[in-house]
Amino acid sequence: MPFCGDVEAASQELLMQKSALGPIRFYDVFFCEDLAACHTKFRNFDIKVVSVVFSQFEEIMMIDADTGFFVSPAVLWDSAKFKATGTLLMNDRIAHEIYFMAERVGGSGNVSFQHRYMSKFDPAPFRFIPTLDREKATLPNPAPVELQFEPSDYLLNSHSWNLRTGHQVDSSLMFWSKKKQPRATAILASFKALSDVGSPPSYGDKELYFYAAELAETQYSFSDHAIGAVGTEYEDHGEKNSTLCGDMAQVFPIKQASEDDPEAQPVYYMKARMADVYPGAFGERRMECPFDITGAQFSNAEARHLTGRQRLHDLVLEWEKIAQDTASDPMAKESRQAATDGMIDEQMHQMRGAYRQVIKPNV
């Protein structure tokens, strides 16, 4: 568990004692001139990049702490995409077509910050590092910039490169193999190192993995499916004509289902659609909600699974609250810890039961 000087020793000791969590290794990324400088540089999204680079694992599944699952993401280790390239990235929303990656240089025109950064990137210092050679692009470059690296068809066809969105990657779930992608990993590290490489335009860390793989001239994998949504604000206008506002949701069918699958699954979620579909600019409708979609309602088992996760989060916060309590009698603290441990064990037992009742399509 990486941290930046902000996890107290008592909290580390407490969490390492919890058998329900399994073995945990804490490592502090505090190697800056002083604590304030370290907080400025790494107490933000960048700590995720540092986690990938400094992790002892060669193959990494990185998950945001607030991400929930209805199917174990471990099944994606065996996906054809990850096995082939050692990477698996998820698509982000098609939104903010004049901001973030798509922000225009000078405020207007057809050259974005992404275009400028990638056109100025010099791949030569990294070319001695091995990579998974990819085929040359077959598509023309639609951007009015020249590139010093060999671009991929994925980049040239991407929504961000074509100024349709300011986002490309959702990094709440990401797979990365350092042993298969040594050059991309080195470039990823260079984005946050004290060097003259500099960091690309991105909302936090999200797009950095995509930039690193693309600039490494390597093969890499994206989900074929667009990001969806899960929430309660559902406007039902029929198949492929509805709108759903809420949190982001990824659907990655292991086995592709027919769109006419008759199995009903009685919050709503958005069914998967292909990532290369461009439904139009979100800004034209003054919203960031997926539209022209097909939705479905959560089953009772799925709803119980989500609410169980919220309850588990509250109990883990109670763990830390007890650990930081210096005023209570040690015997009383131990009793409170034992009671909380019991509630967590019971909650996890209930969640496992609810999880077994969740229908797992296409797996």
Image: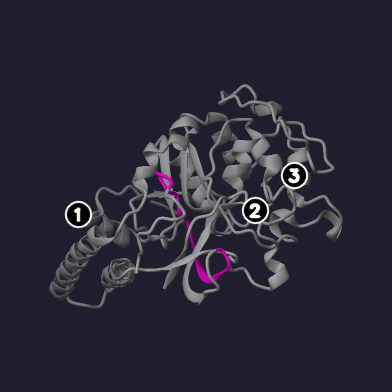
Give x and y (percent) for residue 182.
Answer: 53, 30
Residue at 37% from the left image edge and 49% from the top image edge: 362
Q: Is residue 331 visible?
A: yes
Mark 2 vs mark 1: in front = 2
Query: Mark 1 belongs to which amino acid?
Result: Ser
- Give the labeled residue for mark 3: 117
Q: Secondary structure at mark 3?
A: helix
Compared across the picture, whether 176 is left or right of 307 comes to right
Q: Residues within 10 Å of mark 1 (few under 14, many from 20)?
A: few
Q: Is residue 278 left or right of residue 73?
A: right
Point out the tag, 3 or 1, that comes first from the N-terminus: 1
Q: On the image, which quarter does residue 15 sit in?
A: bottom left
For residue 19, which numbered disc appears in the image? 1
Q: Is residue 253 magenta?
A: yes
Residue type beneath disc 2: Ser
Residue 222 at x, y percent in the picture: 54, 43
**Residue type at numbered disc 3:** Tyr
Q: Tag 2, which secondary structure? A: loop
Give the alpha-carbon distance from disc 2 to disc 1, as whole Å.
Answer: 38 Å
Q: Nearer the viewer, mark 3 or mark 1?
A: 3
Crowdedness of circle 2 by 10 Å Cα count: few (<14), some, many (20+)? many
Numbered range of the magenta stretch: 240-256
Pointer 2 or 3: first along the chain: 3
Residue at image position (70%, 26%) is 124
Q: Residues within 10 Å of mark 3 (few under 14, many from 20)?
A: some
> What's the CA distance linking mark 2 and mark 3?
11 Å
Which residue was labeled with disc 2? 202
Closest to the observer, 213 or 240: 240
Residue at 70% across / 63% down in the picture? Answer: 281
Q: How many marks?
A: 3
> Which of the two discs, 2 and 1, labels the residue nearer the N terminus?
1
Residue 58 on the magenta segment: no
